[in-house]
Amino acid sequence: MSFPTYFSNFPDLDYAVSLDKAGNKTSIKIKDFFHLLKVRDDIYKNVTIFSPYVIKDGMKPDQVSKEIYGDERYYWIILQANDIVDYYNEWSLSFYDLDEFIKTSYGFPKSEEIHHYETVEVKDEANNLLLPAGMKVSSDYAFEYPAFPGSSTRLTSRPVSVSNRQYEYDLNLKKSQINIVKPELIVRFEEEVRSYGYRLDRNMDKVSQY
């Protein structure tokens, strides 16, 4: 993935990559991307700048950026907009990589063992939600509700089991459902990042003078 030029104004920091037995650290210079998580919090609260997007199988952030904006350099904004710091653990895997991950992490038959139990959706006759689906509960959980309003007949909804494999599938599906900055606003957003980095760099220069 290419390195976006608008990060050039962000200050460098020493990032420790190893520590020897004597306690001496080996560091490398990286851009201070940690500040990037705080860029214009007020903008992020404005949900109208986002559109939902589902990551296609195997697509990486730069490929999503290329598809949506016609330029791969906006992949950092995609990651930032979804609070993704650890790409390897927070970005969705391809179907193949997911199955390999499950095989390595669990093996067989552990992959088919129960991970947890969760509720199934329950609604009344008027389509009012009584119990949402997907709530993690104990295996002996039971939800009782009237067959219809005023009825003395009680119905019972019991949870369903979710295997380790299904849990990982569901988790990966959630990771694939992201938000993107609307294409017509991406240039303005990039300018905000540039401006923020410039102000940050100047402020750190002032601090270093004392």
Image: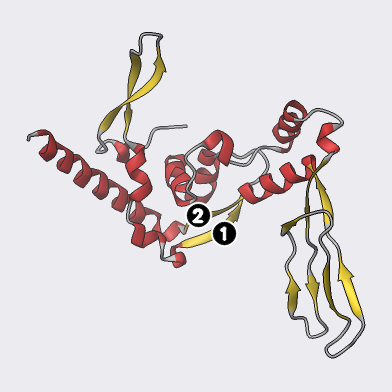
Q: Nearer the viewer, residue 6 or 145?
A: 145
Position of residue 190 in the picture relative to residue 182 (left or right): left
Q: Nearer the viewer, residue 156 or 202?
A: 156
Q: Nearer the viewer, residue 35 or 10?
A: 35
Q: Pointer 1: what residue?
A: 52
Quadrant location of the C terminus in the rendered image: top left
The quarter of the displayed image where residue 33 is located = top left
Position of residue 113 in the picture relative to residue 177 (left or right): right
Q: Pointer 2: what residue?
A: 180
Query: How many other residues sit within 10 Å of disc 1, few (<14), some (14-19) or many (≥20)?
Result: few
Q: Is residue 80 visible?
A: yes
Residue drawn at x 72%, y 48% as measured from the top left:
170
Distance from the alpha carbon under mark 1 to that under mark 2: 6 Å
The quarter of the displayed image where residue 29 is located = top left
Q: Is residue 71 visible?
A: no
Circle 2: element type = strand
| Residue 185 percent location from the top left of the image | 40, 59
The quarter of the displayed image where residue 15 is located = top left
Q: Answer yes or no: do the residues labelled 1 and 2 have beta carbons within 8 Å?
A: yes
| Residue 103 percent location from the top left of the image | 77, 28
Residue drawn at x 67%, y 44% as measured from the top left:
172
Q: How is the image coloured?
A: secondary structure
Q: Is residue 123 above or below residue 62?
A: below
Circle 1: element type = strand
| Residue 94 percent location from the top left of the image | 68, 37
Q: Is residue 193 above or below residue 24?
A: below
Going by the numbered disc 2, the residue's amino acid type is Ile
Q: Is residue 194 above or below residue 89?
A: below
Going by the numbered disc 1, the residue's amino acid type is Pro
* N-term-proximal mark, 1 vs 2: 1
